[in-house]
Amino acid sequence: MTGLRRLWYVYAKGIHIDPSVSISLSSRFEPGARNSIFIGPQTLVAFKTLLISRDAETETVRPIRIGRRCFIGGGSTILPGVTLGDESIVGAGSVVFEDVPSRCIVAGNPARVLRRDIEVGPYGRLAGADENSRRLVQVALQSDPTCKKQVYDTQPRAGI
């Protein structure tokens, strides 16, 4: 998130955004009032997400709280009054109507809990994801010798 956009959200709109939060430029926030959206540290809000804190039917403001180390997938919508617990993951395209417990994965419309007691790192990255990525590269290198050249050609070179 750019510095100017962050300043706009924090000072003009009254949204509490921790400095370590990563927010896509295409995401949108619709606060009904100041301090109606809170986003905790080390959280990632992906592209084309929508957070709405004003209830359209009753015209009341119901705050949204997103915990620490969460991931909100692209195209998701978080509706008024929802609390996302710490270390939770929202799948892409989900519509979240109700509170999400800590350390859970939710997805769908309406969003439902798919898995509980997950372990995540910063920005909602699943524990073990780095090891899986390393294994995939190793398998690709072993199965296709030309792949080795492509993988190493994409690495930055010293002195260039």
Image (spheres, rainbow, N blue to C red):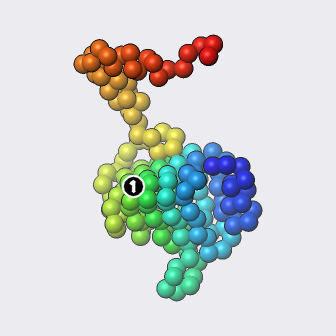
Residue 134 location, x and y as percent?
A: 37, 24
Q: Residue at x 39, y 34 (%)?
A: 129
Q: Residue at x 72, y 60 (%)?
A: 8
User: Secondary structure under badge 1?
Assistant: loop
Taking the image as shown, residue 6 lies to the left or right of residue 128, namely right
Taking the image as shown, residue 129 lies to the left or right of residue 143, namely right
Q: Residue at x 45, y 65 (%)?
A: 77
Taking the image as shown, residue 44 lies to the left or right of residue 135, namely right
Residue at numbered disc 1: 92
Q: Nearer the viewer, residue 22 or 124?
A: 22
Residue 119 to residue 34: above or below: above
Q: Amino acid at mark 1?
A: Ala
Residue 10 to residue 125: above or below: below
Q: Residue at x 54, y 20 (%)?
A: 156
Q: How many numbered marks does the figure carry?
A: 1
Q: Nearer the viewer, residue 46 or 63?
A: 46
Does the image show residue 37?
yes
Residue 104 location, x and y as percent?
A: 38, 52
Residue 90 location, x and y as percent?
A: 41, 55
- Image quarter hosting the C terminus: top right
Crowd rating for badge 1 (residues with CA inside 10 Å; few <14, some 14–19, many 20+): many
Does the image show residue 135?
no
Check the image and name the residue furthest to the left: 143
Q: Nearer the viewer, residue 69 or 94?
A: 94
Residue 132 location, x and y as percent?
A: 35, 30
Q: Quadrant of residue 144?
A: top left
Check the image and name the residue furthest to the bottom: 58
Q: Quadrant of residue 114?
A: bottom left
